[in-house]
Structure formats: structure tokens, C-alpha cells
Amino acid sequence: MRLQEKAIENLEAAERLLDTRDGDLEPLNNAAASRAYYAAYIAVADRVLRSGRSLPEKGYFKHDSFPDDAFHYGFLTGELREVLVWLRDLRVKADYEEDQVNYEEAALAAARARALLHAMVGKA
């Protein structure tokens, strides 16, 4: 499976985790925010790798520096860099902090991840 397909899979998972149409389900905001970040991260990583750059020795791009690296490589605009930083920081809140991600944050994360994914696909 190509990384772009994994990005789409993560985005779809984020959106499903927010879907409450069933009536019996509560949205899983923390999980959705985490999947939204990974959708965006993987989409950007795919774009960087398709340009001919290789993965660092550890086998992945470091989450803390990747938004800046992708910006300096020329794959992200300043605005998209900020989106990836926001998504990363929300994922940290979702996965590691006591504070919970609320539905509005999670839904915004999914929407921003979708926009970032579309921006990366359009640059193929």
C-alpha cells in the first residue's frame, strides 16, 4: 500500500470516529484527532519521498521538526506548515494529556487534514 493510500485510510478513520449518525455511538474525539494528524503527516511524508528524498536513518521523519523540514524543502506553504503543527499539537493533547479533545477540535482536525492531503495530492 502506498503511503498516500495510508493517508486516505487514516483520514477516513478519523471521519468515522466522529460519525454519530448511528445514534448509539459517541464520537471518539481523541482517536479522531490522532488519526487526522497521521493522515496529514503521512500525506506530507509521501510527497517528500516521491520527490526523491529518502527517509532519515530512523525510518521516519521526526514529528517535532517535520513541519519545518517540509516547509524548508518547499513542500508546505507557511499556512500548511502551521496546519501540520496544529494537528501535531492536537495529537499530543489527544494521546498524552489529561485534557480531552472536544468534538469541534476533532472535526476541525479532520477538515484540516483533508485540505492538507488534497494539497499534497495536487502537487504530485
Image: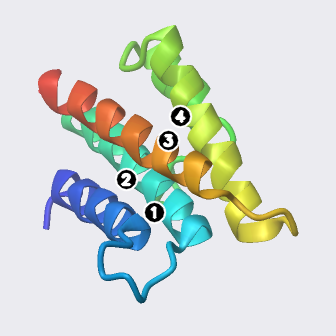
- Asked whether disc 4 touches disc 3, contact meaning CB atoms under 8 Å apart, the reply is no
Asked if one can make out residue 87 in the rendered structure from this viewpoint, the answer is yes
Q: Which residue is mark 4?
A: 84
Q: Which residue is mark 1?
A: 35
Mark earlier in primary sequence (3, 1): 1
Mark earlier in primary sequence (3, 2): 2
Mark earlier in primary sequence (2, 4): 2
Which residue is more in the foreground, 99 or 91?
99
Q: What amino acid does circle 2 point to?
A: Ala
Q: Residue drawn at (22%, 56%), measured in percent from left and top? A: 8
Which residue is more in the foreground, 109 or 40?
109
- Asked whether disc 2 touches disc 4, contact meaning CB atoms under 8 Å apart, the reply is no
Q: What amino acid does circle 3 point to?
A: Leu
Q: Which residue is mark 2?
A: 39
The residue tagged with tag 4: helix, strand or loop? helix
Spatial separation of the CA atoms under disc 4 and disc 1? 13 Å
Q: Residue drawn at (26%, 62%), measured in percent from left and top? A: 12
Q: Quadrant of the C terminus?
A: top left
Task: Categorize mark 2 by other alpha carbons within 10 Å: few (<14), some (14-19), many (20+).
Answer: many
- What percent of the width, then of the height, locates residue 35? 45, 62
The residue tagged with tag 3: helix, strand or loop? helix
- What percent of the width, then of the height, locates residue 75? 36, 19
Spatial separation of the CA atoms under disc 3 and disc 2? 13 Å
Q: Residue drawn at (35%, 32%), measured in percent from left and top? A: 116
Which residue is more in the foreground, 11 or 55?
11
The residue tagged with tag 1: helix, strand or loop? helix
Spatial separation of the CA atoms under disc 2 and disc 4? 10 Å
